[in-house]
Image (cartoon, rainbow, N blue to C red):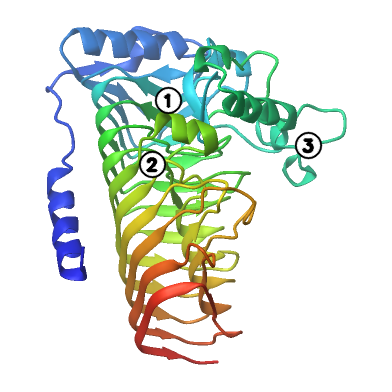
Amino acid sequence: MNEEEAWRYADELRDRVRPPQFPDRWFDLTAFGTGDTWTEAFRAAIEACHEAGGGHVRVPPGTYLTGAIHLRSNVDLHIEADATILFSTDPADYLPAVYTRFSAIECYNYSPFIYAYDQENIAITGQGVLDGGAGPEHWWPWVGTPEFGWRPGTPHEADDWAELQRMAADGVPVEERVFGTGHYLRPNLIQPYLCRNVLVEGVRIVRSPMWEIHPVRCENVLVRNVSIYSRGPNNDGCDPESCRSVVISGCVFDVGDDCIAIKAGRGPDGRRVGVPCEDVLIEDCDMRYRYGSVAIGTDTTGGIRNVFVRRCRWGGPGLYFGLYIKTNSVRGGFVENVFVKDIEISELTKEAVSIDLYHGDGHNGDDPPPIRNIHVASVRSDRTRSAYLLRGYPEQPLREITIKGSSFARVQRADIVSDVERLSVTDVTIGK
């Protein structure tokens, strides 16, 4: 795929990923319950909407405390301006455990706050707020670091995370990988799983326990005009994983980890499932904080291809990387056909372009990932540590890397290049 073909394909992708349509039926949440908690009202309103053949569940102005919300086919959860869905901080409100992924490994765990499994034509829309209620008192301490509220003697996820990885490595069936009660693996905020025709539009997301928007093995996903402000641990903004046909447009990311991270399963579990993430378009987004602006990895085991990024703004104090392709020979998989253009960078603490096979575990596995056909053009950067860092392996170099027509001002150190074949850097200015 060359540049001309790539951007033509990106336009076709944008045109074919259309929002689902819903019948003009409206179900007001307040008609299905009152009181201090609204979990049952959400369940009943969504079920009534679904059974009627679809439509919109309206969340009017006000604050609605709830546990897990499970969407059904043909239902739009519409959160009006001045409405807030406030999620409970009691882990019991996210039981029974559901089929999910924690850090790219399949298991049964606490339900994501808004969850759908094997549904089609679903949406979360409106100008309201999704408030995960997380912070140093709730959910974040489970990560196990004092920065986020953990104190000696309080629970954290290290033992459960180690056990889940062991189960995956040993081939334990997923139905036996049951966490939840008495365990400490944080749920994601929004997760459609094995769904088709998904829309998340307009809402504001704050205080998430972990990843905010995490579609898994979905097809035709549109995330647009969403703003996310959640600087907690592992608070990635949007993580399409093993999905096909995804468009992320017009969003703002001010988050505690990668703004967007494209994933495809991890390690032995990723090899077992073997589903790539492909055909992802990211356009007209603001990435403000914290690690990768657009990250590909770390979970690349199923493979990632056909990623297009254009007309985005990256930068701010505390934002690390721009394009950040990160994997290693333990994770494996492949990354190919990544095209980036028309990017404005105000400030990054590290590289504008980083493609690094020594991320995390380094070179300690037997599955060196092929990385090929990466094109970056028309980047205008005002401050970075380096313009680019490119590190392959001697036996598996990076291949066909192009950086062109770009300018990088106020660069603090020299670029790093090792084990790269067919590197082309043309019409690029780098200044100190």
Badge 3: few (under 14), some or many (20 or more) residues near its Cα, within 10 Å?
A: many
Q: Measuring 34% from the left and 16% from the top, which residue is drawn there?
A: 29
Q: Measuring 63% from the left and 56% from the top, which residue is drawn there?
A: 362
Percent position of residue 145, x then y: 76, 42
At mark 3, the secondary structure is: loop
Percent position of residue 301, x then y: 46, 43
Q: Would you name the residue on which mark 3 appears?
A: 150
Please determine whether, in this image, residue 126 is positioned above or below residue 422: above
Q: Nearer the viewer, residue 408 or 319?
A: 408
Relative side of 151 to 342, left or right: right
How many angstroms separate mark 1 from mark 3 (CA)?
Answer: 26 Å
Amino acid type for the residue under numbered disc 2: Pro
For marks 2 and 3 on the same chain, the one whose residue lies earlier in the sequence: 3
Please determine whether, in this image, residue 245 is positioned above or below residue 293: above
Q: Quadrant of residue 115?
A: top left
Q: Would you name the residue on which mark 1 appears?
A: 114
Q: Measuring 84% from the left and 35% from the top, which residue is drawn there?
A: 151
Q: Quadrant of residue 85?
A: top left
Amino acid type for the residue under numbered disc 3: Trp
Please determine whether, in this image, residue 276 is positioned above or below residue 167: below
